[in-house]
Image (cartoon, rainbow, N blue to C red):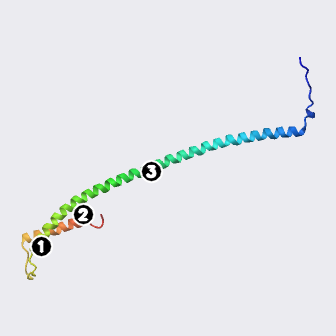
Amino acid sequence: MPERINVNPLSINPLILLVGIAAAMSIGFGGGWTANGWRLGAKIADVKAERSNEIAIQNKEVLDDFVATAKKIREQADGANADFSELAKDLTAIRKEFKDANAKPLPVDCHPDAPRVRKLTNAIDAVDHAIARHGPSD
């Protein structure tokens, strides 16, 4: 058996002991710092992923709202085109009737007959309808 060497612990150079302790502490501190960085990096990545998902959901909602609004605008535009064609027919008929009208003033005691009152009422109704459908509130 080999001979055992007994070393007195007090005979170790204190400088070597301090260097060893400092090296061990540095390695421990560096390892802890690295592990904490990995943990916080993972947490930051989770927060970023969560925020990205929230932004994606908000963007989808906005896009869906935009598509629905565009569809409503298209429907309104199609309806307006149809209304304008009907309005043009009505106004052409009114213009034709009033173009042939006599511009002489009527006597004070004159009362229009029933067909003339009906035509005037229809003309007023057509204009009121046009104003109500295509007024400034649309």
- Label whose residue precedes the other's in the sequence (2 or 1): 1
- Quarter of the rendering containing residue 88: bottom left
Q: Report the number of discs.
A: 3
State left or right for residue 126 relative to residue 55.
left
Image location (x, y in percent) of residue 52: 51, 47
* Residue bearing mark 3: 59
Q: Which quarter of the rendering shows the C terminus?
A: bottom left
Q: CA distance from mark 3 to mark 2?
A: 35 Å
Q: Are marks 2 and 1 in contact (CB under 8 Å)?
A: no
Residue 120, numbered label: none
| Residue furthest to the front | 2
Tag in front: 3 or 2: 3
Q: Which mark is residue 133?
A: 2
The residue pinned by badge 1 equals 98
Q: CA distance from mark 2 to mark 1?
A: 23 Å
Instruction: Give the SS element for disc 2.
Output: helix
Apparent side of residue 62 relative to residue 134 in the rendered image (left or right): right
Q: Amino acid at mark 1?
A: Phe
Disc 2 residue type (three-letter): Arg
- Above-or-below relation of 36 to 76: above
At horizontal 30% and vertical 55% (from top left) the residue drawn is: 74
Of circles 2 and 1, which is in front? 1
Which residue occupies 84% across, 40% down? 19
Q: CA distance from mark 1 to mark 3?
A: 56 Å
Locate the N terminus by quadrant: top right
